[in-house]
């Protein structure tokens, strides 16, 4: 049985990928390696905990001993690296963990993979893959009429988070060019879906709206992101693992550009369909008649990129991949999930994070 190591597999996207990999690759053993930071939660993996192909190892990708022990014990046929500090606002307040995990951790994984790869028998060496999961934020910001990012767009990260992801992408490329490590990078747009930590836009707005709390919209609400349903992203990562070119780089997008204000309004409308405002006592208590009345414009985030848009033609062509969900169907499923999983929300919020405003550190 081949082993696939999934770092950050207890987070939002990683846990979705683990479910998909176990379902789609019955002959693969999936070992999740995760530090369980505030964003990592074994409750995200509860439905696969008893799967015979699943194992969990707690550890830190930035800790050399942890990583070397992991490779020695599990001898992977492939590694997919989702582990990261992932929230831009946190990186503005303090970037040190972002540098440590996103750059230092990626380096430790790459270096352990290089040592492991060179010792493998020829046939296994040929098949080994290292997939690094990255973001479209490495490309910087677009104006309204600029063409979408493609794989040749120069890197121009604007936030400490984006800079840390960009640095790791460069190390992946360098390990392929220098050592021949069969590594590749995927750069994906904004994800949404079940199990997303409620500091991110869609779960934050959904939970606040359910509870009749204000919906804080940064600046004029006109910042544009391309939204992708998490399972579609995971199918793209799996396609890159199975069919991607070593040394390759693939953009993955959802073909769903929306302003933040459009996203918030779509959440309000999806909620209205599932739990009408007049039937929600929290709204009556807040003295408002509709979810949209909870919208509140707040000071913008420093260095807030205006627009991201993804050209994913290469992934569609080379990987035979395309997103299966449109924004309306993905969002309806997401809102339904948050309504049905209030216990999960309360559990993950029981740590330090209380939906407070982060990322206001002075320029
Ligand atoms: P997340 O914050 O929900 O999960 C991150 C996971 O990594 C958590 O389980 C956490 O415990 C783990 N982790 C953090 N530091 C670690 C360390 N030092 N060692 C081991 N594990 C550690 O993040 P997410 O939204 O699921 O994002 C996953 C990956 O996808 C990240 O690399 C992120 O940059 C990338 N990505 C995210 C998006 C998005 O919209 N969320 C878009 C594109 C790319």
Image (cartoon, grey):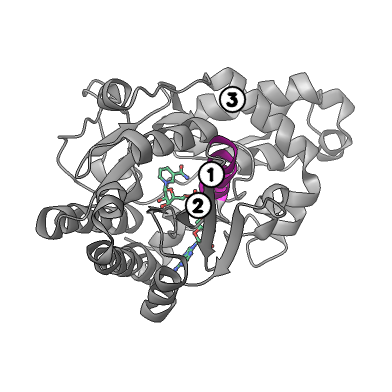
Say which label, 2 or 1, has the lower sequence index: 2
Report the front residue among 282 and 219.
282
Q: As displayed, is residue 299 above or below residue 260?
A: below
Measured as percent of width and height from the top left, residue 16 is found at 57, 43
The part of the image, by quadrant, that contains residue 149 is top left
Circle 2 residues within 10 Å: few <14, some 14–19, many ≥20: few
Say which label, 2 or 3, has the lower sequence index: 2
In the drawing, does residue 3 fall left or right of residue 177? right
Question: Is residue 61 among what the camera can see?
Answer: no
The residue pinned by badge 2 equals 1
Mark 1 within 8 Å of ligand 1, using the beta carbon: no
User: Which numbered disc covers residue 86?
Assistant: none
The part of the image, by quadrant, that contains residue 356 is bottom right
Measured as percent of width and height from the top left, residue 217 is found at 53, 38
Q: As displayed, is residue 138 above or below residue 263?
A: below
Say which label, 3 or 1, has the lower sequence index: 1
In the drawing, does residue 180 fall left or right of residue 140? left
Marks 2 & 1, CB-CB < 8 Å contact:
yes
What whole-number distance in Å separates the C-alpha atoms at marks 2 and 1?
A: 6 Å
Q: Indicate the quadrant containing the C terminus: top left, top right, bottom left or bottom right.
A: bottom left
The residue pinned by badge 3 equals 330
Viewer-side label of 3, 1: 1
Q: What element carries label 2?
A: loop
Stretch in magenta: 12-24
Q: What element carries label 3?
A: helix
Measured as percent of width and height from the top left, residue 345 is found at 73, 50
Q: Residue at x 72, y 28 (%)?
A: 291
Q: Which residue is drawn at 52% across and 18% down?
A: 326
Report the front residue among 336 and 220.
336
The residue pinned by badge 1 equals 27
Q: Which residue is drawn at 58% across and 56% down?
A: 10
Measured as percent of width and height from the top left, residue 273 is found at 76, 19
């Amino acid at each position: 049985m081949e082993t696939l190591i999934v770092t950050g597999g207890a987070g939002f996207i990683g846990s979705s990928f683990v479910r998909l990999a176990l379902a789609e690759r019955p002959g693969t053993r999936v070992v999740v390696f995760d530090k369980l930071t505030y964003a990592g939660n074994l409750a995200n993996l509860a439905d696969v905990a008893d799967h015979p192909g699943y194992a969990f190892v707690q550890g830190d990708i930035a800790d050399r001993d942890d990583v070397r022990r992991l490779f020695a014990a599990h001898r992977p046929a492939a590694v997919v690296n989702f582990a990261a500090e992932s929230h831009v606002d946190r990186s503005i307040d303090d970037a040190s963990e972002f540098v440590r995990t996103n750059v230092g951790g990626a380096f430790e994984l790459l270096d352990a993979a290089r040592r492991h790869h060179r010792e493998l028998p020829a046939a296994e060496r040929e098949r080994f893959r290292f997939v690094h999961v990255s973001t479209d934020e490495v490309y910087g910001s677009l104006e309204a009429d600029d063409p979408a990012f493609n794989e040749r767009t120069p890197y121009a990260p604007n936030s400490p988070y984006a800079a840390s992801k960009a640095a790791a992408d460069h190390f992946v490329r360098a390990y392929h060019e220098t050592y021949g490590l069969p590594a590749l990078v995927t750069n994906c747009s904004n994800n949404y879906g079940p199990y997303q930590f409620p500091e991110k836009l869609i779960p934050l707005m959904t939970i606040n709206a359910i509870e009749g709390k204000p919906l804080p919209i940064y600046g004029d609400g006109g910042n544009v992101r391309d939204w992708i349903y998490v399972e579609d992203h995971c199918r793209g990562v799996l396609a890159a693992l199975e069919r991607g070119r070593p040394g390759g780089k693939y953009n993955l997008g959802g073909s769903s550009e929306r302003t933040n204000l459009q996203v918030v309004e779509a959440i309000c409308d999806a909620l209205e369909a599932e739990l009408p405002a007049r039937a929600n006592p929290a709204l009556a208590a807040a003295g408002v008649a509709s979810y949209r009345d909870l919208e509140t414009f707040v000071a913008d985030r420093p260095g807030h990129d205006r627009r991201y848009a993804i050209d994913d033609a290469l992934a569609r062509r080379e990987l035979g991949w395309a997103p299966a969900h449109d924004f309306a169907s993905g969002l309806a499923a997401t809102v339904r999930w948050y309504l049905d999983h209030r216990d999960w929300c309360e559990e993950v919020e029981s740590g330090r994070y209380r939906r407070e405003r982060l990322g206001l550190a002075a320029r």
